[in-house]
C-alpha cells in the first residue's frame, strides 16, 4: 500500500479541460510512495545506464548537471486518478544520455535508490518523450517528489516516472517492475485507462 502525505486536497473536475478517463484535476502535488523517503546526497549521488552487455555509463551529480538540459512543460497523470496540468521541469533528455550508448535493447528497467523498479519499452523514453528531471517549477526537486532526480515519462501513468532514479538497465526482454509484478498494467497509458492487468 502506498503512503499519501500532506498536500492532497481532493477532487475537482472542470468540464472545459480534457483529462484521461477516470481522472480529476488537482492543483496540489500529492506525494505517494511505497515507503520512507530516501535522502540521497548530491555528493554521493550517481546515475548510471547499464547496457545489456554489462557496459556501464556513469555520471556524478556535477557531470550530470553539465549535460545539456531541457525545460519541458507538460501534464502528469497518476494511477490514483489525479492529474496535474502544465507542470514545468528541468532535466536531461534520455536521448542525450543514450547518445554514446551502444545497445540493441528493446526494454528498460528503471532502478531507484529505495529499491523500487519499473519497466518500460525503450522506445517510450526516446524522441523527446522522457527525461531525468532535477528541478520542478524552477526549484531543485524536493526529496518527497523524487529528488535529487527522478525519471519523467509524462505520457504514461506517473508510477512509471521512478522517483530517486539511479540506474536505467537496458534489457533484451521485458522484466516487470515493482507495481507491474503486483498487478498493475505492464504499460500504463492513462488515455486508455491501463491501470491494472487486463485493462
Image (tube, grey):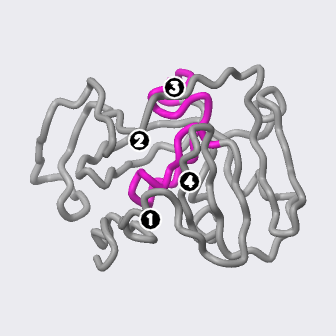
Q: Between residues 107 and 21, which one lies in front from this camera angle?
A: 107
Q: Which residues are magenta?
A: 136-165
Disc 3 or disc 1, which is closer to the eye? 1
Q: CA distance from mark 4 to mark 2?
A: 11 Å
10 Å neighbourhood of mark 3: few (<14), some, or many (≥20)? some
Residue 143 tag number = 3
Please name the residue that numbered disc 2 is placed on.
Answer: 34
Mark 2 or mark 3, which is nearer the start of the sequence? 2
Please name the residue that numbered disc 4 is placed on.
Answer: 117
Residue 26 drawn above or below residue 187 = above
Q: Is residue 139 magenta?
A: yes
Mark 1 or mark 4, which is nearer the start of the sequence? 4
Whether residues under marks 2 and 1 lie with C-beta atoms below 8 angstroms apart, the answer is no
Residue 180 tag number = 1
Disc 4 or disc 3, which is closer to the eye? 4
10 Å neighbourhood of mark 4: few (<14), some, or many (≥20)? many
Amino acid at each position: 500500500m502506498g503512503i499519501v502525505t500532506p498536500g492532497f486536497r481532493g477532487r475537482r473536475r472542470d468540464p472545459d479541460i480534457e483529462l484521461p478517463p477516470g481522472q480529476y484535476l488537482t492543483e496540489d502535488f500529492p506525494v505517494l510512495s511505497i515507503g520512507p523517503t530516501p535522502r540521497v546526497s548530491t555528493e554521493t549521488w550517481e546515475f548510471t545506464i547499464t547496457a545489456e552487455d554489462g557496459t556501464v555509463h556513469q555520471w556524478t551529480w556535477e557531470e550530470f548537471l553539465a549535460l545539456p538540459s531541457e525545460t519541458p512543460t507538460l501534464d502528469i497523470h497518476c494511477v490514483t486518478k489525479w492529474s496535474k496540468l502544465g507542470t514545468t521541469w528541468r532535466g536531461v533528455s534520455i536521448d542525450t544520455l543514450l547518445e554514446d550508448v551502444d545497445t540493441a535493447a528493446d526494454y528498460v528497467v528503471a532502478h531507484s535508490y529505495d529499491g523500487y523498479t519499473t519497466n518500460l519499452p525503450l522506445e517510450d523514453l526516446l524522441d523527446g518523450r522522457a527525461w531525468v528531471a532535477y528541478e520542478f517549477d524552477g526549484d531543485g526537486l524536493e526529496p518527497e517528489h523524487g529528488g535529487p532526480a527522478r525519471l519523467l515519462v509524462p505520457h504514461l501513468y506517473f508510477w512509471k516516472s521512478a522517483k530517486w532514479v539511479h540506474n536505467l538497465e537496458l534489457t533484451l526482454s521485458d522484466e516487470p517492475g515493482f507495481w507491474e509484478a503486483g498487478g498493475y498494467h505492464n504499460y500504463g497509458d492513462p488515455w486508455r485507462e491501463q491501470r491494472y492487468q487486463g485493462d
